[in-house]
Amino acid sequence: MKSYSSNLLKIILLVIFLFLFVFFIFYIKKNAQAPEGPVSIGGPVGNFVLKDHTGVPHELYYYTDQKAVVLISHANNCLINRHLNPYLNRLKDEYAAKGVKFLMINANPEDTLSSIAKEAKDFDVQIPILKDRPQVVSADLNFHQAGEAIVINTEDWSIIYRGAIMEKKMDAHYLSGALDALLAKKSLAVTKTQVQGCSIDMQMGYSKKEVVYTRDVAPILMNWCVSCHNDGRDDTWSINDYETVKEYGQLLREVIITKRMPPLKGDELLSPEELRTIIRWVDQGSLRGEGEDPLF
Ligand code: HEC
C-alpha cells in the first residue's frame, strides 16, 4: 500500500514537472520572438518612426494611450484608396473617441512627400500618410499592395487583423468588425482576408542582395557614427570592430528605424539606401564578408 501511494506521488510530481517544463519552453520561445522581419497575424510589430505628408514624424509606440492602431497601405493614383477615402474619414472620426488611431503608409517609389500632399488635398485624405522611402517598415509589415489594412493591438503590438477594409458587394465591414471585436475584448472570427489592391513596387524593401559588414556596413558606420562612437567619448559605446557591431545588431536596427541615431537634425540623416543596408544586414544575420575590418 505504502509503495503504491509513493509511486502515485512520483507520477504526479513527474506530470507536474513535465507540465512546468513545457510551459517554460513555450514562455521562453514567446519572449525570444524579436520584433523583426515580416510580421504575421499575432506577431508583434516593431517600433518605427516615419514622417507624414505634412512633415510631422509619427512613432508607432508613441500611441500606447490608444487601444488600437490601424495602418493602411497607400499609393497615389490608386483608385481603391481614393474610393475608400470618404469611408475611412468617417471611421477615423467614429473610432477616435474609442481610442483608435488611423495612419496610412506610402512605400510607393514614385510618390514623393509633395505629390502625396497633393493627392491628400485633391482626394480629401484626412488620415496622416506616412512616407516609407526605404520600404523597410512596409517590408516588415508585409505590405505588397495599397488598400490593405492592418489592425494592431497596442497592448502587445500584435497584429489582430490584416486584409480588406470592406467588401462593398457583400456589405462586409471587415475593418470596423475587427475594431469592434478588439474594443469589446472578443476574439475575432476572421483575422485575415484577401485584398484586391493596387500593387506596390516593393523590390527595394524585399531585396535579397547579400549585405556584408566589410563592404557595405562599415563604410556607413564610419561616415555617420564613429565621430561620436569612439574611445574618446565616455557617453557612448565604441563602434570599432565587427564583433561589437554584430553584438549590438538589434539595438542598432531599433535606433535607426526609429531615427534616434544619428541624433542629427533635418536632412542630415542616413539615406534610404543606407538605412535599408543596415537593417537588411541585421536581418540577414550580420555577415562579416571578406577582407580586413575597416573599423578595427
Ligand atoms: C552626434 C553624436 C552621435 C552620432 C553621430 C551617433 N550617435 Fe549613437 N549615441 C550618441 C550618444 C550620446 C548616445 C548615448 C545616449 C543615448 O542613448 O542617446 C548614443 C547611443 C547609441 C546607441 C545606444 C542606444 C541605447 O538605447 O542604449 C546606439 C545603438 C547608437 N547610439 C547607435 C548609433 C549609430 C548606429 C550611429 C550612426 C548611424 C550613431 N549612433 C551616431 C551619440 C551619437
Image (cartoon, rainbow, N blue to C red):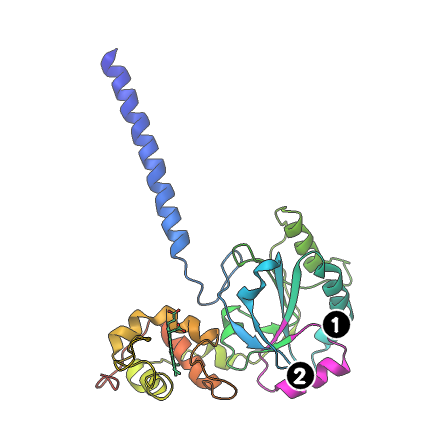
* Residue 286 or residue 209, whichever sits in front: 286
Q: Secondary structure at mark 1?
A: helix
* Residue 91 or residue 178, whichever sits in front: 91
Residue with the mark numbered 1: 85
Quadrant of the picture in which ligand 1 is shown: bottom left
Which quarter shows the C terminus? bottom left
Question: In the rendered image of this protein, does residue 49 appear above or below residue 177?
Answer: below
The earlier-in-sequence mark between 1 and 2 is: 1
Q: Is residue 252 magenta?
A: no
Where is residue 191 drawn, in percent x and y?
60, 55
Specify the amino acid type for callout 2: Ile
Q: Is residue 117 magenta?
A: yes
Which quarter shows the N terminus? top left
Residues packed near mark 2 inside 10 Å, few (<14), some (14 to 19) or many (20 plus): many
Where is residue 165 drawn, in percent x and y?
69, 64
- Cβ of mark 2 under 8 A from ligand 1: no
Where is residue 24 drawn, in percent x and y?
35, 44
Where is residue 174 drawn, in percent x and y?
69, 58
